[in-house]
Image: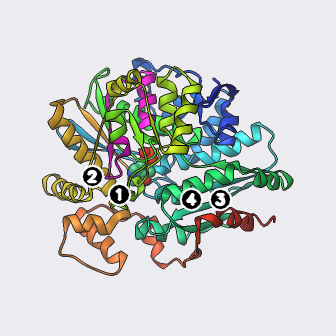
Amino acid sequence: MFYKSTRNSNLKVDSAQAISQGISEDGGLFVPESIPSLTLDEVKYMSELSYSCRAAYVFKKFLTDFTDAEIQYCTDNAYNTKNFETENIAEIAHLFDGTYMLELWHGPTCAFKDMALQILPYFLTTSAKKLNIDKKIVILVATSGDTGKAALEGFRDVEGTQIMVFYPENGVSSMQKRQMTTQEGENVSVCAIKGNFDDCQSGVKKIFTDDEVKKVLEDNKLMFSSANSINWGRLVPQVVYYISAYASLVSDGQISLGDKLNVVVPTGNFGNILAAYYAKKMGLPLGKLICASNINNVLTDFINTGVYDRNRKFYATSSPSMDILISSNLERLLYMLTGDNDAKIREWFGALASEGRYEVTDDIKAKISEEFYAGFCDDEDTKKTISSIYEKYSYVCDTHTAVAVKVYEDYRKATGDTTRTLIASTASPYKFSSSVLEAICPCFSADDEYALVDKINELSGITIPESLAGLKNKPVRFSGSIDKESMSDYVMEQLDVK
Ligand SMILES: *Cc1c(COP(=O)(O)O)cnc(C)c1O
């Protein structure tokens, strides 16, 4: 299996190369040249396996240049009870009739990003070894809150790597900030940017492609890679949990093998929902893929009209991990839907870079509507949804997941579709304590983050994750913030090379 660049179909690399590079030199994203198939018999077979073995089974189809032993080394080290609170790795909660919450937040940083970022460092170091790369790998991360911490935990003290994380100074929850600024490890640094997530993301992209920086890296035996979902090594682990969830629902007798299952995903960078699309294209019987946005609803508009237009106001919302106006992974979807038309992708994404806008053709628009439904939910409705789910089902969900639930309710009302449905629950409610409590216990107020955490614990009965409880007494190591123009200098300083 080879991987092509979305901006140059003639460029082909194996998965080790795609993962270690992160992004193609032409600015394109790596995509598999074909989608491997998955039969219902295989799904049935997988239902008997542990999560780690299910993951290995899927990886063997995509990472064909890895040996079985290499894949097992990666999955064994990532998906175990040292890293995850639960043996199942991901849990499924039955919310109401035919609706299931896929809880993807039982990992070390309490958000779904752990599902991929616990394994990415093993993929990356294994890839580097396979390619005889003897350079230190420098990971630059732009984060809207959750990726940063998950990447820091994944890469901390991993030999041969160094990691730097940039987050928007006022764009993350206080728990997210505390998680990052207290990060331990000798090879980590964290820096706040005076700007929003898109500023962080474009800053990082600029450093990646800066010729002067490239020369400095070359001279110092360093190389950049990415832990953002532009890296194929981030996406392929996300395909696993959709297949795994389907297999679990079959073995639990909730669905029969072959039944359709809709999927709802609270979406920002379009990585998570794209993984569901890959699973569907492999042959998993998924129905509609429902893309839920917050008020930064650029994707809702795109899916409904075919026009992608980022020229709009940026809002800081109560679901900050989705406060994004440039959804990178859409490029992969469009590449597939155009039949690998790299010229079209260059045209559209060139226009996005220069004018902030592009419009796809009618046939592509039709193909998108066949597979996807899109809706959005503002902060007020997010709050109401958290509160009503709590009242009706005694289930406490975080703000991002609530956006998904609300859009799903709207979808059911609009279409009457009662197909059984899996909702991706992407973060622990403890990460967004103050917004969650505002919804379920509006009279409660406290200055101390941990008083909020204790209150949620009292109301929900969900055990407080040790990783969050433990932050209380950890010293802040990274308190600085810089202008977005200074990111490149900051990187040079941290690398200690200039
Ligand atoms: C990152 C994130 C999202 C958005 O996922 P994408 O793959 O970027 O679409 C949603 N919810 C939470 C909690 C996240 O951390």
- At horizontal 40% and vertical 63% (from top left) the residue drawn is 465
* Percent of width and height locating residue 74: 61, 42
Front of the two marks 4 and 3: 3
Q: Residue furthest bottom?
A: 447
Q: Where is mark 3, residue-wise?
A: 163
Q: Quadrant of the N terminus?
A: top right
* Percent of width and height locating residue 481: 57, 73
* Percent of width and height locating residue 338: 49, 22
Are there few (<14), some (14-19), or many (20+) residues within 10 Å of tag 1? Answer: many
Q: Secondary structure at mark 1?
A: loop
Q: What amino acid does circle 3 point to?
A: Ile
Question: Earlier along the polypeptide chain: callout 1 or callout 3?
Answer: 3
Q: Where is mark 2, residue-wise?
A: 402
Q: What amino acid does circle 1 point to?
A: Ser
Question: Earlier along the polypeptide chain: callout 3 or callout 2?
Answer: 3
Horizontally, residue 63 falls left or right of residue 103, namely right
Q: Marks 2 and 1: CB-CB under 8 Å? A: yes
Q: Is residue 169 magenta?
A: no
Are there few (<14), some (14-19), or many (20+) residues within 10 Å of tag 4? Answer: many
Q: Residue furthest front?
A: 355
Q: Where is mark 1, residue-wise?
A: 319
